[in-house]
Amino acid sequence: MKDKLYKAFIDATHNVFKLMLNISEISAQQAEDFRCEEEIDISIGIVGDLNGEVVFRFPAETSLRIVNIMSGMHFEEVDAFVTSAISEIANIISGNVLTAISSDSMKCDILPPVQCKLDKDREYEMETSCCISTTIGEICLVIRVNRAS
Amino acid sequence: MLWKDNYELGVPHIDAQHKELFRRVESFLKVLRSKDCWDEKIPKINETLEFMKRYVVEHFHDEEEYQRSIDYPGYEAHKQLHTGMVNYVVEVSKKYEESNNDEQLMQEFGGRLLAWLINHVAAEDQRIADYAIKKGMSGNER
């Protein structure tokens, strides 16, 4: 399941970046490679047969480039508009993943995006992360869930 | 420009509405993101918000009618996406009015609207076009 989730998030990110931002060149690397001074962390809660969250760690520069491509407008700083736009992208990617992995024996739903501070101390049954590298910068995904008992 | 030609579905009536929607959203974003002080922007913001509330509902209705006319199998799921967005627009409008034109609320709305609209037209609506092409009904008007 961990590998399935990992692959589903990479595929969904790839599709969303291609369709929404016209970016096709994407590669997944080890999360340890992710380096960022200023980031915006967006958490999407997962509930149902799996419980947990996926945290999208968007570097500020990448966030500004994403919103620039979508709007054609220049953004100098990460404000409420930028945060909301990248939160919706995290929501779209996660929604696509849940649709892809859902089946008769696996029912999950997602919660609305929330800006958060990544809590690295909490432990989960399944935890994986990756650094997605694109032509407009990197994004780190931290996926961590427990199976519903 | 917000609109891209590859967003076209090949259904003239729906494509025309999409273009108008993008044109209005682009105009809304330009006002929202301009350097003018917030009080000066409020009349234009309010006008666009009112338009969006009317036009989004009208467009979604027409798009759903088209889906029914071609027996699109994803009709119910697509309708749910429309309903979710309409509810969000109504909810934000209400909060905005109650907050006496809060700028932060409108900036959040603008960001989400931008990403939602692009994904909806570039991904979700394209599935309708793909289905119509597959069934040999591309370009069909209702």
Image (cartoon, coloured by chain):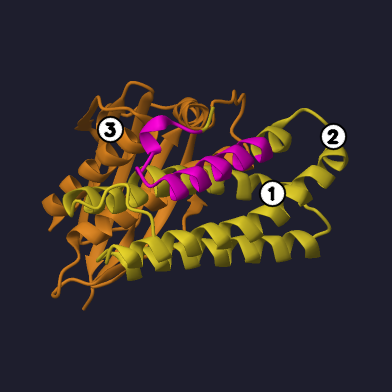
Chain colours: A orange, B yellow
Q: Which residue does the numbered mark 2 point to in the structure image?
A: B37
Which image quadrant for residue A138? top left
Name the spot of residue B81 as percent of width and height, x first. 42, 62
Q: Which residue does the numbered mark 3 point to in the structure image?
A: A132
Say which of B20 and A93 sits in front. B20
Name the spot of residue B88 as percent of width and height, x first. 57, 63
Q: Is residue B10 magenta?
A: yes
Q: Nearer the viewer, mark 3 or mark 1?
A: 1
Q: Is residue A123 magenta?
A: no
CA gap between label 3 and label 1 equals: 31 Å
User: Which span of residues is magenta-colored?
Assistant: B3-28
CA gap between label 2 and label 3 equals: 38 Å
Give the SS element for disc 1: helix
Decide if residue B24 is on the left or right side of residue B59. Answer: right
Q: Residue at x 41, y 64 (%)?
A: B64
Disc 2 marks a residue whose amino acid type is Cys
Q: Residue at x 28, y 27 (%)?
A: A133
CA gap between label 1 and label 2 equals: 14 Å
Give the SS element for disc 3: strand
